[in-house]
Structure formats: structure tokens, C-alpha cells
């Protein structure tokens, strides 16, 4: 529990990633494809992507129960930044190719998750 208390931020971010994977698995078509959007937009919530999100989320959450060495913490930061920035780009393309070119709540929410991960990576205690 000592390490979970110390790594609570990364644990919660791993839980968010895991939850996004669950949402993609249980909702048939979470990301619809606007008429002008590229074809790959509708495929990023398919089961292979959802399973990858579940695995990444579980890895991050289970890593938080032990001491996070610098190399493991760097790996976690890289993976989480990659995943959330990827989905920020996908949701942004989706929103700006829709008939009403305006970011939706999900895009803004993912943007702030990305910023939060960056701030925690730079300002947390370097172990």
C-alpha cells in the first residue's frame, strides 16, 4: 500500500486507460465516422485497440503496487502519453471533419488528460 499511495496518480491514469478500453469493448461503435473523415477513424475503437488499452491499463495499475524505478516510470510515461496523444489526434480529426467543426467533450477531456500526464511527468519526484 505504501507504493500505491506514492504512485496513486499513475494508478488512476492506468485505470482511466483501462476504462477507455472497457468502453470501446462494450459499446459497439463508440466513434462514428463523419462523412468527410478518413476511413481509419471508425476502426480505432475496434477490439484489437480496446484489448491493447486494457493490457496497457492493467500493466500501469499493477506496476504501481511496487517501487517505480526510473526505467519503468519512463516506460509508463511514454506508453500513456503515446496512447492518450494518439486518441487526442483521432478525436480531433473526428470532430473537425464533422459537419459542425467544433471539439466535443471527449476531445477536450482527453486533451486535459494529456496535459496532466505531461505535468506529472515533469513535476513529480524524480526517483
Image (cartoon, rainbow, N blue to C red):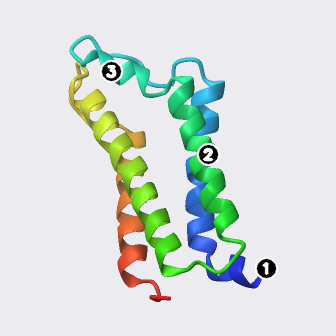
Tag 1–tag 3 contact (CB < 8 Å): no
Residue, far front: 71
Residue 99 in percent (x, y) is at: 23, 18
Residue, far top: 35
Tell me the SS state at disc 1: loop
Camera-side residue: 93 or 105? 93
Residue 92 in percent (x, y) is at: 27, 37
> What residue would you read off at disc 3?
40
Residue located 25% across and 22% down the image: 98
Q: How far apart are marks 1 and 3 (CA)?
A: 42 Å
Using the image, tell me which numbered label, if any, was put on residue 1: 1
Using the image, tell me which numbered label, if any, was put on residue 127: none
Q: Which of marks 2 and 1 is in front?
A: 2
Residue, far right: 1
Residue 89 in percent (x, y) is at: 28, 40
Q: Mark 2 or mark 1: which comes first in sequence?
A: 1
Residue 52 drawn above or below residue 83: above
Tell me the SS state at disc 2: helix
Residue located 38% across and 41% down the image: 87
> What residue would you read off at disc 2?
55
Tell me the SS state at disc 3: helix
Residue 38 drawn above or below residue 56: above
Residue located 54% across and 28% down the image: 48
Q: To which quarter of the image does residue 101 belong? A: top left
Amino acid at each position: 500500500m505504501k507504493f500505491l499511495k506514492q504512485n496513486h496518480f499513475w494508478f488512476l491514469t492506468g485505470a482511466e486507460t483501462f476504462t477507455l478500453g472497457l468502453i470501446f469493448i462494450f459499446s459497439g461503435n463508440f466513434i462514428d465516422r463523419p462523412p468527410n473523415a478518413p476511413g481509419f477513424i471508425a476502426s480505432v475503437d475496434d477490439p484489437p485497440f480496446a484489448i491493447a488499452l486494457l493490457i496497457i491499463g492493467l500493466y500501469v495499475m499493477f506496476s504501481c503496487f511496487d517501487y517505480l524505478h526510473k526505467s519503468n516510470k519512463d516506460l509508463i510515461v511514454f506508453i500513456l502519453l503515446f496512447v492518450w496523444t494518439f486518441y487526442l489526434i483521432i478525436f480531433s480529426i473526428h470532430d473537425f471533419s464533422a459537419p459542425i467543426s467544433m471539439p466535443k467533450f471527449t476531445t477536450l477531456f482527453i486533451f486535459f488528460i494529456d496535459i496532466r500526464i505531461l505535468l506529472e511527468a515533469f513535476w513529480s519526484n524524480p526517483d
